[in-house]
Image (cartoon, grey):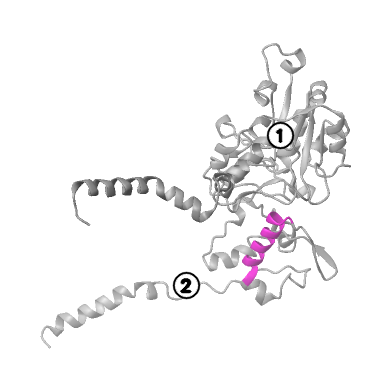
Amino acid sequence: MDKNRRNFLKVAGISTLAGLGGTAVVDRLVGGTSLAQAAADSGHDVDQAKGAQGHGEIPSSSGNRYGMIIDIKKFQQDPSLGEKAVQACHSVHNVPQFPDKKDEIKWIWMTNFENAFPTSSNPYRDEATAKHQLPILCNHCDQPPCVRACPTKATFKNKDGIIMMDYHRCIGCRFCMAACPYGSRSFNWRDPEAFVKNANHVYPRRTRGVVEKCNFCDERVGAGKQPACVEACGESKAIVFGNLNDPDSEIRKMLKENHTIQRNPALGTIPSVFYIV
Amino acid sequence: MYDSGKIIPGLIIFVLFITIPIWYNRGTAASVPKPVLPKDAKMCVLPAAEIRSEHMKLLNTWRDEVLRTGDRGTFELEGKKYQKSLMLTCMKCHTSKKQFCDTCHTYASVKPYCWDCHIAPVE
């Protein structure tokens, strides 16, 4: 083949085109995959897709999935209930009481309606809602963003659907706190030892540099008891705890009978805590 | 040998100097620890030699089983049922952290972080 300028330009042009578009074509032909399948290969996208449609559907998980219904009306009728529930939880779990609000540790706490449900509040609230507070806690999401963020698997979903913390593994990076859209997690900036009053001697406290949060009273539920906050509300049934995967459970009956809302369901985290407004 | 008058005393001083830790601490060697064993319990969860060398592994296994797998099953020992728990099982017999845990841990200069969170029995 004689080397003239015309032939050189032809070869160079074809090579350039092959280099630009060829790899994609070859990949498609060799792999035999479509774009949809390529997207499905990355697990995170699947998780997100599931989560996005999630709040309309019942997630299909086997085993137990513990959940909670909080009746806001009962907390409005008896304002002392909230304090009782918070007190019961924090004393059972040795939650420290720091004098400085910046160091505050909370597992369950009372807050205003507009803070708990920023997307469903409006400026013309009814009096009861404006005046009273409601308890909020970790939502024990079915699609927990904190678990995905944790680099050490210190936080994980256990077989009962409870989002647990293994404080032995926590390195205090606080990724989970950034990931949690509900602010359910607190960081121990200081050693809590001196700030736990009347420690409960059958449950550990935490140490400086770990993140802590509500554990749905896994240690009590595992022993066949009700969570401390549920027990503190007593006969009022202001908080009801149960297995969401059991169609005959009390919580499922209550969910059937009442209109309930979740905190920010649009995020697709599928919270396990429901509120009767 | 040239300068032996300087070299030999120098060597002696050097040897004495680098062996300071040996003769300075002579006679003060800590005695082998004698942890106080519980009076009423005869048997531990494992045979003595095994529990002595493996107790830290056992505690980790218990923690993983209870916390991670959610297996809170009890085990039986001399007709009594026990939970897999440091605070609720070990420390119920070994009621003194100072006289039991600390004796060996101090001797071996190990600092387990158990008690950063777990609460030792009141003494």
Q: Quadrant of residue A91?
A: top right
Q: CA distance from mark 2 to mark 1?
A: 70 Å
Position of the N terminus of chain B, as image quadrant, is bottom left
Residue at label 1?
A: A55
Viewer-nearest of labels 2 and 1? 1
* B59 is within the stretch colored magenta: yes
* Relative image position of residue B102 (x, y in whole percent): 60, 63
Residue at the location (65% across, 38% down)? A51
- Looking at the picture, tell me which residue is in the foreground, A191 or A219: A219
Q: The disc labelled 1 sits on which kind of residue? A: His
In this view of the protein, can residue A152 be seen by the observer?
Answer: yes
Mark 2 secondary-structure assignment: loop
Main SS, magenta residues: helix
Rendered view: A43 above or below A257: below
Query: Magenta segment range?
Result: B54-70
In this view of the protein, can residue B123 be seen by the observer?
Answer: no
Residue at the extreme top of the image, as rendered: A124
Determine which of the numbered discs, if any, sits on residue B28 in the image.
Answer: 2
Rendered view: B12 above or below A134: below
Q: The disc labelled 2 sits on which kind of residue? A: Thr
* Relative image position of residue A3 (x, y in whole percent): 19, 53
* Relative image position of residue B88 (x, y in whole percent): 74, 57
Residues packed near mark 2 inside 10 Å, few (<14), some (14 to 19) or many (20 plus): few
